[in-house]
Amino acid sequence: MAAGAGADQHSPVPTAPERQRLAAYGVLRDERGRLLLARASPALTLRGRWFLPGGGVQHGEEPRESVRREIEEESGLAVSVGSLLDVLSDVRTIPDGTNLHTVRLIFGVDSWEGTLRAEVGGTTDAVAWFTRDELADLPLARYVQTVVDTLL
């Protein structure tokens, strides 16, 4: 056998599947300065954590329309979406082993109307307004803590 023969015959190291997700969220604050959050339902891996209302941008959907649609689904409120406040990015491994990269567009919400109500049979199971002090006692999604620390 020639010198070095077989040196390149190592099996490649398997890599985790990768997925990227684009999501858009709204920052809603009421007249008392409280922040609106939605709680992840038991159907999600992050169940029980509190999120900004919003979610995945569907194929071909404008991000601001995603914010309007998701907030209405999760809270019953019809909103007027304002300016882009921030873009956040995080990578984590989800329970099935997938390496998930999420890009989050954070929009301000200029106004809203309607009656607050929880989503039924969806990805969230509660929605509520919280003061900054109350946020300290909640299990927040990591990106929400970033928003609170940098934007509020």
Image: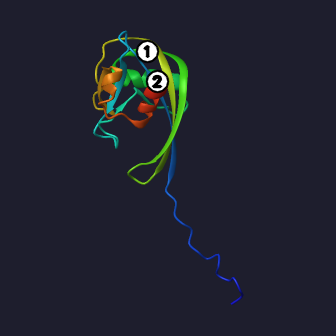
Secondary-structure class at tag 1: strand
The residue type indicated by label 1 comes to: Val
Q: Where is residue 19 in the image (x, y as percent from the top left)?
A: 51, 47
Left or right placement of residue 69 versus residue 116 in this view: right
| The one of 40 and 72 positioned closer to us in this rendering | 40
Q: Which residue is drawn at 40% across and 22% down?
A: 71
Q: Earlier in the sequence, mark 1 or mark 2?
A: 2
Residue 82 in view (yes/no): yes
Q: Where is residue 20 in the image (x, y as percent from the top left)?
A: 52, 43
Please indicate whether residue 12 sits to the left or right of residue 79 in the image: right
Taking the image as shown, residue 139 lies to the left or right of residue 108, namely left
- Secondary structure of the residue carrying tag 2 is helix
CA–CA distance between discs 1 and 2? 8 Å
Residue 96's disc number: none
Quick one: 105 or 143, which is closer to the camera?
A: 143
What is the count of numbered marks? 2
- Residue carrying label 1: 79
Circles 1 and 2, Cβ within 8 Å, touching? The answer is yes
Amino acid identity at mark 2: Val
Question: Which part of the image, by quadrant, shows the C terminus?
Answer: top left
Residue 67, which numbered label?
A: 2
On screen, residue 73 above or below 16: above
**How is the structure coloured here?**
rainbow
Relative to 121, say whether 31 is above or below: above
